[in-house]
Amino acid sequence: EAPSLPAPWRVWPGGDALPRILDGTVTVVCGPGAAAGCGRLLGAHVVIPRGATGDVDTDYGAKARAALGALDSAYRVVVHVGAPDEASHRADQQEKIAALEALDALILAPLAEAARVTGARLTVCPDHGTDPASGEHLDTPVPALFWGNGVAASGPDRFTERALLEEAVR
């Protein structure tokens, strides 16, 4: 039997369950680990495709196929890709670039095409930045991209850190 921890060490002292913020209309596609656990705790349907990991060896195509397959039954589909973050933690700039290029070509491109064909919207947002020189998380604001049916153009014309920073200081 696990020992009872004193109140400061318990997240929910009464043992209450997390509120179900998400429901079956939300699907989280990810590798095994924290993203899957968070999705389940919040009430989402979680899909872990074969070959999906939280690192650069993930099967990007499998994640894209799972996301596209979930579009029939889910109102929102979240795809977690940890590869750029993990490459940055190893301070491997080239590996981070390769991860971002793979993410763009193998996940974002097919999802953007599906959004274009169906009239859906696509949102791309990192949870935080990670400096590939130091391997440390950044506390700076993160960019977000909203694209698709009914979304008016605004902001910079390129989705790069420099363009977004320049837009933020205007």
Image: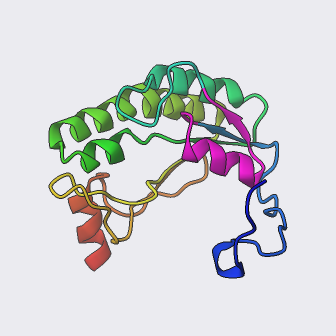
Is residue 123 in view from this perspective? yes
The one nearer the camera, 150 or 170, is 170
Is residue 72 shown left or right of residue 144?
right
Query: Horizontal and vertical percent for residue 34?
Result: 56, 47
Give the camera-side residue of 116 and 135.
135
Counting from the top left corner in percent of width and height, residue 157 is at 30, 54
Does residue 170 lie above or below 70 as drawn? below
Dividing the picture into quadrants, the one containing residue 4 is: bottom right
Q: How is the image coloured?
A: rainbow
Point out the stretch of residues depicted in magenta.
Answer: 30-48
| Residue plotted at (61% across, 52% down) | 150
Q: Position of residue 111 (x, y in %)?
A: 53, 32
Please report the residue visible at 32 percent of the width from the left and 62 percent of the height from the top.
137
Is residue 11 found left or right of 107 in the rendered image?
right
Residue at x 27% of width, y 61% of height: 136
Does residue 95 sit above or below 166 in this rendering?
A: above
Q: Is residue 42 above or below residue 26?
A: below
Magenta span contains residue 42 = yes
